[in-house]
Image: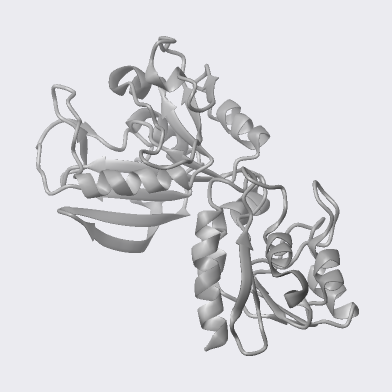
Amino acid sequence: MFIDDAYAHLHALSLQGLGVSTPNPNVAAAIYAADGSLISDGFHNRSTSLDHAEVLALKKAGSAARGATMVVSLEPCAHTGTTPPCTGAIIEAGIAKVIYAVTDPNPLAAGGAQILKDAGLTVEYRKSPELENAQRAWLHKERTGRPLMIWKVATTLDSKVAASDGTSQWISGAESRDDVQLMRAQSDAILIGTNTALVDNPHLIPRGLKARPVRIICGEQEVPATNQIFDSEARTIVVKSKSIPELIKVLVDEGFNQVLVETGPTLGSALLASGNIDELIIYQAPKLLGAGKEFVAHLGISTLDDHIELELISVEKLGSDTKSHYRIVKGR
């Protein structure tokens, strides 16, 4: 079906917008002729243009947009912000029909569908769970006021992130590490604790990719200015505190949509216990240590009724490792 193919195309484009659209949503748009052929497309990328996806697609289409159908991953905005409303550009270009996959929850920008209808366009809302999932970080921020927080952990089969002597590189295999590079590129910021910064001296720049997520260090220990995380390849923010509310305030003030948490057990568990971890991704290697550092520290849970419940989103095999993706459905 036309809409299935169009939504699949938008899904791929929307994923390209992850990490480059903040503070805006990673919207994708495509314009189709009456015979279903693709005229033009675009996704929001603030690193190259302030134009929204709809405007990018319209500029590429030119006069071919008149009488055509636009398919967009999010309801076109109806307010003037950094740029004029997309509804105005769509109407002026002569688009005849608009199909959108997710309604805009932002009270300032919502209402675009009605404006387009009032202007005489045919407008259809065709819900897409896949496109909602692709844009979930921004949607989460709109709903909660803070970025989507994804905790990434590499463990052995018995949940160890380091051996008794402190060694931890490399628990996961090459395929898992490559997958992490993509996750980093799709995130606006990467968070680590000062202990991770001192022990691992990470660079946190996605290998082989253009993305440059902001690097954030949280904790009270002093990290030498000569460490890789302070080089000029990306911006680095230091939150010199153990306060979770203080850390979250910094993330909110920055306007991030998605933050990848690559901390050790102490900070990661504190974020989990405080209800600030939304998703958990575990790369589990087929290795056993029997002793060593567990990936989860003390959560203050003493009875089963207080457990933290997770919903399994997906499982996939990466080399010899297993990647499990969970959503936190019940906090403490």
The single residue placed furthest to the front in the displayed view is: 63
Q: Position of residue 315 (x, y in %)?
A: 29, 62
Q: Position of residue 202 (x, y in %)?
A: 34, 26
Give the answer, above or below, for where 180 lies relative to 316: above
Q: Residue at x 52, y 18 (%)?
A: 241
Quarter location, residue 90: bottom right
Give the answer, above or below, for where 317 lies relative to 219: below
Q: Residue at x 70, y 80 (%)?
A: 69
Q: Position of residue 92 (x, y in %)?
A: 86, 70
Q: Residue at x 10, y 37 (%)?
A: 289
The single residue placed furthest to the right in the displayed view is: 118
Q: Looking at the picture, tell me which residue is in the foreground, 302 or 285.
A: 285
> Does the image show residue 264?
yes
**Along the horizontal axis of the image, is 186 left or right of 322?**
right
Q: Looking at the picture, tell me which residue is in the foreground, 48 or 249.
A: 48
Query: How many numbered marks have been drawn onto this rendered protein structure?
Result: 0
Q: Position of residue 206 (x, y in %)?
A: 40, 38
The way the protein has been coloured in the rendering is one colour
Q: Looking at the picture, tell me which residue is in the foreground, 259 or 33.
A: 33
**Along the horizontal axis of the image, is 250 left or right of 332?**
right
Give the answer, above or below, for where 122 lies relative to 228: below
**Along the horizontal axis of the image, is 76 left or right of 291?**
right
**Along the horizontal axis of the image, is 174 left or right of 302?**
left
> Does the image show residue 307?
no
